[in-house]
Image (cartoon, rainbow, N blue to C red):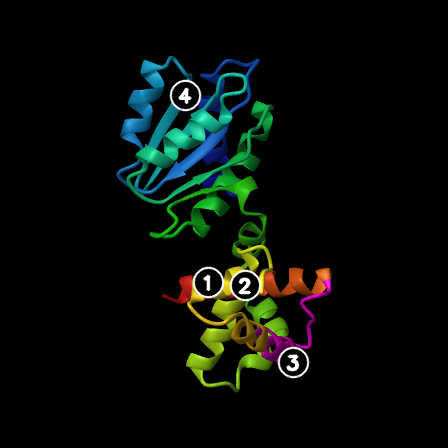
């Protein structure tokens, strides 16, 4: 561990020491200007929290009341003024450095369109943003069969897969969202299966395709 990391871990433990030892905590990382409204709201509601501001980053540790985790996360979502990453709920102050790394991974996955990412709510995205080289390799291995298609054609197939995955794997629901006929959706998905060599009736293959789709978005974000 280098000196800077050791100093950061020491600062995090000091923040954790400011919180009630019997309650768990979240680590919240936010781009500037941070979460001033959340800090104020937490004080009003008497929810313990501790904060540190660094150049380019605000670090917060929050101790939700028992059963109040969802309430705190919703408060962060409503009041976020930029990109935010939230760790899982951690019960051991000795694990604050681990929670920090998980929150940082969630922050890396956040976007302008989806600015608040909670680590435990996005396991696929967390897997691929944790290592950019792994993400690139996953895209190459799983989706490489689409590389020789025209860019627009490739984008249509990937968009159809993504929409299908968020609409219960239903061609009819996907068609409604994409403003096309269900048979058009089925045709596109068959082409995707043929190109990738992965069947959408095989749960393992579906998991690989969706992981690759998340990885592709992560790689594109990193190169933007």
Residue 101 at x, y percent in the picture = 52, 41
Report the side of 217 relative to 54 (left or right).
right
The answer to which of 94 and 142 lies nearer the viewer is 142
* Residue 49 numbered tag: 4
The reply to whether the C-beta atoms of the residues labelled 1 and 2 are less than 8 Å apart is: yes
User: Which quarter shows the N terminus?
Assistant: top right
Q: Is 140 rendered above or below residue 106?
A: below
What secondary structure is marked by label 3? helix
Q: Which residue: 49% across, 72% down?
A: 181
What secondary structure is marked by label 4? strand
Q: Give the residue at mark 1.
A: 176
Q: What stretch is highlighted in magenta?
A: 189-202
Residue 109 at x, y percent in the picture = 46, 51
Q: Give the residue at mark 3.
A: 194
Q: Does the magenta stretch include residue 190?
A: yes
Nearest to N terminus: mark 3 or mark 2: 2
Which label sits in the foreground, 4 or 1? Answer: 1
Structural crowding at the residue carrying mark 1, measured as other residues with C-alpha within 10 Å and reported as few (<14), some (14–19) or many (≥20): few
* Residue 108 numbered tag: none
Nearest to N terminus: mark 4 or mark 2: 4
Residue 39 at x, y percent in the picture = 32, 24
| Mark 4 to mark 2 CA distance (whole Å) | 47 Å
The reply to whether the C-beta atoms of the residues labelled 4 and 2 are less than 8 Å apart is: no
Report the side of 220 relative to 40 (left or right).
right
What secondary structure is marked by label 2? helix
């Amino acid at each position: 561990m280098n000196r800077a990391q050791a100093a950061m871990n020491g600062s995090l433990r000091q923040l954790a020491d400011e919180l009630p030892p019997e309650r768990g905590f979240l680590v919240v990382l936010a781009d500037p200007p941070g979460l001033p409204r959340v800090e104020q709201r937490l004080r009003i509601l008497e929810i313990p929290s501790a904060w540190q501001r660094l150049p380019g980053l605000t670090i917060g540790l929050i101790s939700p009341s028992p059963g109040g985790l969802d309430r705190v996360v919703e408060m962060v979502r409503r009041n976020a003024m930029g990109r935010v990453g939230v760790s899982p709920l951690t019960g051991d102050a000795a694990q604050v450095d681990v929670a920090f790394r998980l929150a940082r991974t969630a922050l890396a996955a956040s976007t302008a369109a989806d600015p608040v990412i909670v680590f435990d709510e996005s396991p696929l995205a967390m897997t691929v943003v944790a290592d950019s080289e792994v993400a690139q390799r996953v895209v190459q291995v799983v989706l490489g069969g689409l590389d020789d298609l025209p860019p627009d054609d490739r984008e249509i197939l990937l968009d159809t897969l993504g929409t299908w995955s968020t609409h219960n794997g239903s061609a009819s629901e996907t068609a409604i969202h994409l403003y096309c006929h269900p048979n058009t959706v089925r045709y596109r998905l068959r082409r995707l299966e043929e190109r990738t060599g992965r069947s959408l009736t095989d749960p393992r293959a579906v998991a690989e395709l969706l992981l690759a789709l998340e990885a592709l978005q992560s790689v594109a974000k990193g190169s933007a």
